Image (cartoon, coloured by chain):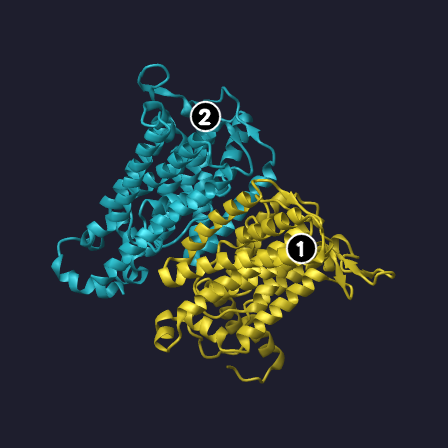
Chain colours: A yellow, B cyan
């Protein structure tokens, strides 16, 4: 794009062009704020007996896992010009199904945990299938389709547990959220593996390209021979299954499903993570890395607010500040302001395409 | 796609400026007509199955209890007509009513408080509009940010229910006025709140259908690019509709607070979705460009009546309420889909 005569400047320029650079900056800023409040914030201690790592950073990784799951699914849905508002409700359904199953099984065995997980993911996939069919074959708008699923899913979760917050006890299920492997929390490791698998799947095959092409220009994609129906159903099922995983993560940590609260407004967190990560809501090009960074940022923000002893119900206001700041930094108008300034200070160069 | 439809018809109707609304009136009114049919059907079903539906007191309560939702739905109709969405209205109600109750209890003049409550809504709406229009933020994200901001600020103010003093003049907005004195408690009553909602509906109807501003709103929903090329004031109009939506949310907060007398930081969670559902049930296309304010009113009443029927039935578990809302919404959207696909064929 530009000549590499001044290496540092061009590196800065390309990294500023990455939309999620601002998310990384915000993440670092939050960590610095925490560090000022408590200089030992970033310290990670190793438990000599079990080898477990503990510390605030580990807590953040643990908390980021469910958001990361739904954010990755949401990224692919948004890339197709869609949106999935139902992920929070699917989380609740998945949690309700698994808790109810293990509660009824009552034996706390590994088998019933695996059965509960399979059942929860199966039902999640089915809800995703309904979304996908309504969007791709019937041709309903994703916003309204998933809004319906959001309402119906929350109701379904309540019907499954008859409106009660169901608890169950199961060692393996509990281990998923609270256990550690090689010192790292299991949820984060499972999350990372799933993200890696999804990334491999979409980036090492033509799948990602086809998803992007639907988002960039559905008509052109169709004319190029890409069939949207199967792809759309695939992304909505994937999004729902990942939401199911997130539901298992978030209920496993307390071994209780709160039907009104589990996953509530998680869809907003996921959409935020995606937008912070630089994927446009208008569809097309997507960045899974960006979404993962966005999920980490949101988890860090949640933890920071608790750490600074601000009432957690005020969290949304800080999220709003982050969204507005990042959206402004990503917007053409503010960028034009930046580039003008740069043009004035450096040697005169060819004018870029105006905003 | 729209250009294909408009091209052959443009020469046929040179005298109508709002050709989009005149071209296919039958097909476009179908979803709204369906909403009316379903509303009437629900009343008849309720009357037969449970009784005491088609009577003054039930119907008056329907309007009194849903006045705030009607106002919200009217505001969202403007936004959705342009193809946008406003997620912030529920949270605006929370902060506006909290501030209102706290100031009123602190002894402020009630009129100043009411004006301030409405202006809080306008301010949030203006902020959304500026983000959307000048900084190219998608409406979904901009109004989501305002929703978070309003909810967060409300939570900072108070996390416990704030009670409005019973003798506060704001509460006079919910005094019941007997219009027809029926036998026993079966009176046709109304409240100033309902009258406010009615005025909002009438003004919105006039603005959308009889003014240049209203035609611009429809034009933007049809195609924003075409509207810009036609020289319509797109920027000003889009800014205005978010301010309108926010302002009406502030007004809805006044109505709601005066009725209930309690404000809390979690007031209005999910109401934006109720309002969007009402607008869609009323026959407004979520992609913008087609729809009616009166349809949104019917949509709000359908949702309200549904709650009445579910309460009366008693055998439906309350947990299933949202499933039924979802199902009704699905029926309406499928109906719209049918209409749109038929329009495409002709």
Q: Residues within 10 Å of mark 2 (few under 14, many from 20)?
A: many
Q: Do the numbered discs 2 and 1 sit on residues whose CB atoms are within 8 Å?
A: no
Q: Compared to A307, does A188 lie above or below?
A: below
Of A324 and B287, the residue lying toward us: B287
How far across and how far down the image is residue B67, in percent?
Answer: 38, 33
Can residue B202 be seen by looking at this rendering? yes
Of A117 and B84, the residue lying toward us: A117
Of A97 and A75, the residue lying toward us: A97
Q: Write down the chain letter for disc 1.
A: A
Q: Residues within 10 Å of mark 1 (few under 14, many from 20)?
A: many
The quarter holding residue B234 reads: bottom left
How far across and how far down the image is residue A71, in percent?
Answer: 56, 61
Q: Write down the chain letter for disc 2.
A: B
How far across and how far down the image is residue B332, in percent?
Answer: 34, 48
Which quadrant of the figure contains the N terminus of chain B?
bottom left
Q: Is residue B341 left or right of residue A232?
A: left
Number of numbered discs: 2
Q: Residue at x 62, y 71 (%)?
A: A196
Which residue position is annotated with label 2?
Answer: B170
Q: Residue at x 36, y 29 (%)?
A: B194
Q: Is residue A23 left or right of residue B315?
A: right
Which residue position is annotated with label 1?
Answer: A112
Q: Is residue A124 left or right of residue A59?
A: left
Q: Residue at x 45, y 74 (%)?
A: A210
How far across and how far down the image is residue B132, in percent?
Answer: 43, 56
């Amino acid at each position: 794009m530009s000549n590499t005569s001044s290496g540092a400047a061009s590196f800065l320029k390309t990294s500023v062009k990455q939309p999620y650079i601002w998310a990384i900056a915000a993440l670092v800023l939050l960590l610095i704020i925490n560090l000022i409040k408590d200089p030992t914030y970033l310290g990670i201690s190793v438990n000599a007996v079990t080898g477990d790592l503990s510390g605030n950073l580990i807590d953040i990784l643990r908390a980021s896992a469910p958001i990361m799951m739904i954010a990755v699914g949401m990224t692919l849905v948004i890339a197709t010009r869609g949106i999935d508002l139902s992920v929070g409700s699917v989380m609740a359904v998945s949690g309700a199904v698994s808790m109810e199953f293990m509660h009824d099984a009552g034996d706390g065995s590994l088998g019933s945990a695996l059965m509960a997980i399979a059942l929860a993911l199966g039902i999640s996939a089915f809800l995703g299938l309904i979304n996908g069919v309504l969007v791709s074959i019937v041709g309903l708008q994703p916003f309204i389709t998933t809004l319906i699923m959001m309402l119906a899913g929350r109701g379904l979760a309540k019907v499954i547990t008859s409106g009660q917050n169901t608890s169950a006890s199961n060692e393996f299920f509990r281990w998923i959220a609270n256990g550690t492997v090689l010192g790292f929390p299991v949820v984060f490791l499972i999350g990372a593996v799933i993200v890696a698998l999804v990334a491999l799947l979409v980036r090492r095959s033509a799948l990602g390209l086809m998803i992007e092409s639907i988002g960039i220009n559905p008509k052109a994609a169709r004319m190029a021979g890409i069939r949207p129906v199967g792809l759309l159903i695939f992304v909505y099922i994937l999004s729902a299954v990942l939401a199911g995983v997130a539901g298992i993560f978030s209920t496993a940590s307390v071994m209780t499903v709160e039907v009104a609260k589990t996953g509530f407004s998680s869809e907003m967190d996921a959409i935020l993570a995606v937008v912070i990560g630089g994927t446009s809501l208008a569809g097309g090009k997507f960045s899974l890395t960006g979404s993962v960074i966005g999920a980490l940022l949101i988890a860090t923000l949640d933890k920071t607010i608790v750490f600074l002893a601000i009432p957690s119900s005020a969290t949304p206001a800080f999220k709003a500040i982050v969204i507005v700041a990042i959206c402004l930094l990503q917007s053409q108008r503010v960028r034009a302001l930046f580039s003008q300034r740069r043009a004035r200070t450096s040697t005169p160069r060819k004018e870029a395409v105006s905003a | 796609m729209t250009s294909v439809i408009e091209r052959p018809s443009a020469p046929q109707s040179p005298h109508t400026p709002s050709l989009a609304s005149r071209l296919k009136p039958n097909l476009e009114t179908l979803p709204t007509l369906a909403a009316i049919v379903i509303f009437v059907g629900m009343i008849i079903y309720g009357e037969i199955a449970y009784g005491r539906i088609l009577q003054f007191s039930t119907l008056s309560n329907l309007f009194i209890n849903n006045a705030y939702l009607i106002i919200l739905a009217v505001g969202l109709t403007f936004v959705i007509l342009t193809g946008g969405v406003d997620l912030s209205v529920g949270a605006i109600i929370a902060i506006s009513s909290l501030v209102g109750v706290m100031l009123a209890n602190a002894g402020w003049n009630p009129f100043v408080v009411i004006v301030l409550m409405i202006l809080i809504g306008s301010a949030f709406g203006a902020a959304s509009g500026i983000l959307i229009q000048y900084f190219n933020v998608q409406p979904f994200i901009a109004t989501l940010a305002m929703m978070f901001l309003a909810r967060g600020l409300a939570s900072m103010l108070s996390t416990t229910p704030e009670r409005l003093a019973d003798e506060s003049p704001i509460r006079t907005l919910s005094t019941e006025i007997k219009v027809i004195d029926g036998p026993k408690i079966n009176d046709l009553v109304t409240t100033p709140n309902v009258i406010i909602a009615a005025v909002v509906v009438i003004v919105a109807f006039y603005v959308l259908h009889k003014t240049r501003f209203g035609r611009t709103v429809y034009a933007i929903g049809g195609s924003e690019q075409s509207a810009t090329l036609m020289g319509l004031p797109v920027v000003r109009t889009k800014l205005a509709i978010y301010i309108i939506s926010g302002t009406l949310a502030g007004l809805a907060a006044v109505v709601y607070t005066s009725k209930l007398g309690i404000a809390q930081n979690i007031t209005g969670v999910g109401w934006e979705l109720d309002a969007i559902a009402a607008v869609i049930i009323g026959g407004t296309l979520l992609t913008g460009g087609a729809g009616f304010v009166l349809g949104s009113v019917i949509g709000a009443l359908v949702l309200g009546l549904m709650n009445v029927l579910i309460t009366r039935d008693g055998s439906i578990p309350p947990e299933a309420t949202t499933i039924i809302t979802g199902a009704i919404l699905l029926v309406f959207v499928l109906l719209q889909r049918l209409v749109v696909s038929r329009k495409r064929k002709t």
